């Protein structure tokens, strides 16, 4: 009891007070931020920046893949992030895929290997996988094809292509048929998947390519372009056409498409199929290394006008753009990934990633597209797949090369927090000065007032918040110990919040504040203690029975958590207690 209040009443009052205090502190700040959009209304064409804004983005480390891999493909299928194939340590192809759900990676067995293979999400919701290298260290090609069903997490190997391929590309037409072209050190040609069970050969190509870019120019027609042949040699600026003769593209004589990349599942499409407008964005570079964006609409090539040149330098050095463009059609924004250009010579310094955002919709009104450059702190690996767009507008990357070698891939996974909030471009000097004079002084006054009020406020408020946290954590621990909720392998924060009638965010914040760990580690600590008791009291129990009886859903998760928490393996712990 607290002064006539029950423990639960006291807890709720303190949590509500915390929210009210936060609301008061940010009230004036919210008013100031509300006024800022009015400044943008007064922008004129003269205030367009010559240098694009630079914004830092957070790269959140997610749980690692179960199998290190590179040369794989990744996309969203059935609402889940899935990685397919690739090769693992020693440049050995892996016949596995993994999907990410509930904070964990789940391994699936594929029918065939698809290292540097072709992967495309079909309109049916299934995923077509075809080809790839045949042997270790990237040797040879394969014919094999299979379909992945994200609803059942199953693979169905159904047949083969007409040409064995590696590093090929695919595009689904409006009819549901899939065009396949491209190869790696083997003959190229155009064939077509009927969307069901079989492939049929269409025609030879006038120019063989590796990882070509395939774009629709009509409902049932497509162009195939690229800058590198099937033997990685520079090729002339011609385009093979699915229906029709070869086309020469003058623009590509000056601006060359990136080598070694190909879009997956129309990820660079910005058109409107209903109106039969087939528009794509393609990254290109000239002989001087300057990068630009080409827009292809119904077969017509043109440079996309931008408010500032694509930045090739940052304060940390040069930028090397090495991925395909990915489009967030909901936000009307496209992304181009880059990395610090000295990554080959300074791998120990890590790899700083850049994300160029392209707000392309305003180009329809004759205005140039605005560019914003995001950057991360240095990360420990090179991702060799184009990032995948998540449902909330962030970008997810998993697996890749460690120390710039294909023989030691990584299992790391990162989420780039970009979201769909617009980024305000820098305005002209006169407006900036007006903002500083008109809003800066009131903001400073409000800030000093808030600081003064905070200093006048006694530490009693902070003491009450700490007491509320201690009350809440004791209730959480009591619930876990008495009800043994940790034995439920699908336990979530929402389950705890529901049992205690408390907002789920308070649960997470409280555990982080008091215990200094995440909810997952907090629960796993109880599970490991339970497993240790079983190992001590029932030494004859099989290890598989131990982890299943302790609330774990997978042996790999159990072993990783046991080692992390106890510093030893279950066998070592058992031997020590024996």
Image (cartoon, rainbow, N blue to C red):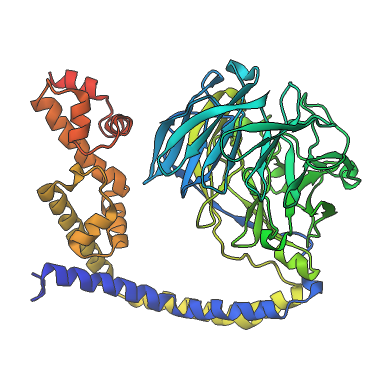
Horizontal and vertical percent position of residue 525: 23, 40
- Say which residue appears at 44% left-offset and 79% top-offset: 27
Which image quadrant is residue 127 in? top right
User: Is 557 displayed left or right of 227 in the figure?
Assistant: left
User: Is 11 displayed left or right of 231 in the figure?
Assistant: left
Which image quadrant is residue 170 in? top right
Instruction: Look at the picture and state if 435 lies above or below 79.
Output: below
- Say which residue appears at 49% left-offset and 77% top-offset: 30
Horizontal and vertical percent position of residue 461: 27, 71
Instruction: Look at the picture and state if 516 lies above or below 420.
Output: above
In the image, 169 versus 531, the foreground residue is 169
Horizontal and vertical percent position of residue 413: 49, 40
User: Is 478 displayed left or right of 430 in the figure?
Assistant: left
Q: Quadrant of the N terminus?
A: bottom left
Instruction: Look at the picture and state if 120 lies above or below 165.
Output: below
Horizontal and vertical percent position of residue 456: 34, 77
- Say which residue appears at 58% left-offset and 81% top-offset: 35
Q: Quadrant of the C terminus?
A: top left
Which image quadrant is residue 379 in? top right
Query: In the rendered image, is residue 165 in sight?
Result: no
Query: In the rendered image, is residue 490 in sight?
Result: yes
């Amino acid at each position: 009891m607290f002064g006539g209040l029950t423990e639960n009443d006291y807890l709720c009052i303190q949590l509500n007070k915390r929210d009210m205090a936060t609301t008061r502190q940010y009230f004036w700040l919210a008013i100031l931020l509300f006024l800022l959009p009015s400044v943008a209304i007064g922008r004129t064409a003269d205030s367009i920046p010559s240098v694009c804004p630079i914004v830092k983005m957070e790269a959140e480390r997610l749980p690692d893949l179960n199998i290190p891999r590179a040369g794989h493909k990744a996309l969203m299928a059935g609402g889940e992030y899935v990685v397919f194939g690739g090769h693992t340590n020693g440049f050995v192809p892996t016949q596995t895929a993994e999907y990410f759900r509930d904070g964990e990676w789940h391994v699936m067995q594929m029918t065939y290997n698809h290292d540097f293979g072709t992967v495309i999400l079909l309109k049916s919701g299934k995923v077509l996988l075809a080809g790839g290298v045949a042997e270790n260290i990237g040797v040879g090609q394969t014919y094999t094809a299979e379909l992945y069903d994200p609803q059942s997490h199953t693979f169905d190997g159904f047949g083969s292509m007409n040409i064995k391929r590696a590093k090929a590309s695919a595009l689904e037409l409006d009819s549901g048929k899939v065009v396949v072209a491209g190869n790696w050190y083997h003959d190229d040609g155009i064939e077509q998947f009927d969307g069901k069970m079989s492939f049929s050969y269409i025609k030879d190509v006038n120019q063989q390519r590796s990882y070509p870019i395939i774009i629709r120019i009509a409902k049932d027609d497509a162009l195939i372009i690229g800058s590198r042949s099937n033997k990685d040699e520079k090729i002339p600026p011609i385009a093979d056409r699915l229906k029709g003769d070869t086309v020469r593209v003058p623009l590509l004589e000056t601006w060359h498409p990136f080598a070694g990349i190909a879009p997956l599942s129309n990820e660079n499409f910005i058109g409107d199929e209903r109106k039969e407008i087939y528009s794509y964005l393609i990254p290109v570079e000239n002989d001087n290394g300057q990068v630009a964006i080409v827009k292809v609409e119904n077969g017509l090539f043109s440079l996309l006008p931008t408010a500032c040149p694509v930045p090739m330098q940052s304060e940390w050095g040069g930028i090397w753009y090495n991925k395909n463009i990915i489009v967030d059609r909901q936000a009307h924004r496209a992304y181009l990934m880059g990395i610090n250009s000295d990554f080959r010579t300074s791998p120990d310094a890590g790899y700083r990633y850049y994300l160029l955002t392209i707000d392309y919709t305003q180009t329809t009104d004759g205005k140039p597209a605005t560019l914003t450059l995001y950057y991360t702190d240095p990360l420990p690996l090179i991702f060799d797949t184009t990032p995948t767009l998540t449902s909330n507008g962030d970008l997810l990357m998993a697996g890749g090369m460690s120390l710039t070698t294909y023989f030691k891939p990584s299992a790391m996974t990162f989420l780039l927090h970009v979201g769909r909030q617009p980024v305000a471009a820098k305005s002209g000097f006169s407006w900036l000065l007006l903002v500083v004079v008109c809003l800066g002084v009131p903001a400073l006054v409000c800030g000093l007032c808030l600081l003064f009020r905070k200093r006048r406020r006694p530490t009693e408020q902070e003491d009450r918040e700490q007491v509320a946290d201690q009350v809440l954590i004791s209730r959480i621990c009591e619930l876990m110990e008495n009800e043994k909720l940790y034995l439920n392998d699908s336990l979530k924060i929402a389950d705890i919040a529901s049992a205690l009638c408390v907002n789920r965010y308070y649960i997470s914040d409280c555990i982080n504040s008091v215990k200094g760990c995440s909810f997952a580690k907090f629960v796993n600590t109880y599970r490991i203690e339970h497993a240790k008791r079983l190992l001590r009291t029932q030494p004859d129990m099989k290890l598989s029975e131990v982890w299943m009886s302790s609330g774990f859903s997978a042996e790999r998760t159990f072993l990783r958590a046991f080692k992390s928490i106890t510093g030893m393996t279950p066998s070592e712990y058992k031997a020590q207690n024996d």
